[in-house]
Image (spheres, grey):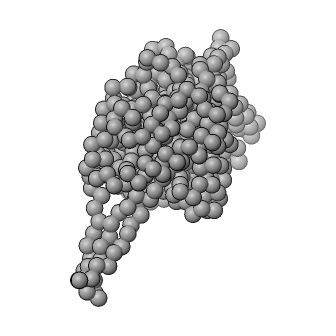
Amino acid sequence: MTETQPKLLIGGEFRRKGNGAPIPVVNPCTGETLWEQPACDADDVAEALAHARAAQKKWSTVHGWDRGRILRAVAAEMRARTDAIARALSLEIGRPIAQAAGEVGAAIEQFEWFAGEAERLFGDTIPSRQGGRLLTEPEPVGICAAFTAWNFPVNLPVRKIAPALAAGCAILVRPSEQVPLTSTLIAEACVAGGVPAGVVQLLLGRAEDISPAIMAADEVRKISLTGSTRVGQMLMAEAAKTMKRCSMELGGHSPVVVCADADVEAAATQCAAFKFRNAGQVCIAPNRFYVEESVADRFLAKMKAEAEALVLGDSQVAGTTMGPLTLASGRDKVERLIADAQDRGARLVTGGRRPEGRNAGFFLEPTVLADVPDEAAIMAEEPFGPVAPVATFRDMDDAIVRANSTPYGLAAYGFTGSHAKAEALSRGLHAGMVGVNTFMVAHAEAPFGGVDHSGTGREGGREAIRDYQNTKLTHMMAV
């Protein structure tokens, strides 16, 4: 990395200062300040919107093949910056450096997939019963805005930038205050790849100084959020005032149903790997484990062994396999949920404490709880941290009912050796995405998103680009 200075991108110009007061970024491994980011205010947003208006007129007329060529060039620039982006990500959110580059690779796939989608933006011709032809044609919805969380600071914004560009839309990106350098490097790749000035703009700063101006702007026709259900509800209410289109990837609380006929040890190994990935700070992380009673002891023994084998440490140390939570408030929440579960009768299998010898940073041991009652807060509230609450069941239908007992519906999982039970889990689990004997539900070529309080709309796959398009119908009579 040649420079560790977060920058704004407004009108094609990278800026080290905004009109707002700079914001420090804290290293979650040490609690020390990494760097300060420039911050925008409403005047900066107004300037960015003026640039977006001008850029939208031009970008919407660029042929899809040419937009695809630029998206592939951005992918190449991202690839060239992989090490720098991975290091920034690791420093800003505390993910182990050895695991950071994988996210960059996933984001590159988004640019490559939507490059192809840009080349396939065709309409349709329908014979008219009244004579002539009915012509349908996709058009860009207009200026878009993206609001993204910090836990996947590369993939989350790119999931919004790539389809917007492919569809012919200019986009304003407001990432979390925690990840300004990671976001800057993505913006640099966009510019280096040939995205015209004003088509992608990066607005760093505080939500309260940026979001209201974006939401009030009638020319912003679509918004996309990855964040909490509470924030999603607030933005959707504001979007209604100007009839903005919304896509929302919101909170989740993913259940896992483990049947006795599954390969229990293999299932527990997968469960531990995905539960403790990114210190549990993953929207589709397995969060509630319902294990058939007859195999619960085997499952818990393997989960315990896998948790205790993790190496907790600084994100920049090569041997670290789990870093800290990114925010002190996140650790406080997880500790509260662990204490509540124990107060209600849950048994601590392993973890549950701040590790000895680490007085700085926001570390918490990977934790497994057994015999967790349904009334424990952790079974209803997303922990977003490294804790696995395990409950048991005797009847699979009952397990599915309990799995579906929250208002969320982002992802759900099941493990079984029976084809019939696999089909029953797929049908019965209420979620936008279901993994059977796997946690791999996120793919560039497939739709990603939830139902109910977990959001609306999809990212990835053919479905995603439709949210960035309007369909125009023309009835063309013979002249």
The answer, for residue 446, to whether it is visible in the render is no
Residue 200: quarter of image: top left
Question: Horizontally, is 303 left or right of 479 in the view?
Answer: right
Task: Identify which residue, 452 or 253, lies in the foreground.
Answer: 452
- Going 43% across and 17% down the picture, which residue do you hit? 2
- Going 44% across and 25% down the picture, which residue do you hit? 86
- Going 59% across and 40% down the picture, which residue do you hit? 44
Quadrant where the image shows the C terminus: bottom left
Point out residue 423 in the picture as x, y percentages from the top left corner.
39, 57
- Going 43% across and 56% down the picture, which residue do you hit? 468
Question: Horizontally, is 372 left or right of 464 in the view?
Answer: right
Point out residue 198 in the picture as x, y percentages from the top left corner.
45, 43
Quadrant where the image shows the N terminus: top left
The correct choice, above or below, for 417 with respect to 219 in the image is above
Residue 330: quarter of image: top right
Point out residue 442 in the picture as x, y percentages from the top left corner.
41, 44
Task: Identify which residue, 39 or 398, lies in the foreground.
Answer: 39
Point out residue 186 in the picture as x, y percentages from the top left corner.
44, 33
Q: Residue furthest top?
A: 357
The answer, for residue 197, to whether it is visible in the render is yes
Q: Residue furthest right?
A: 343
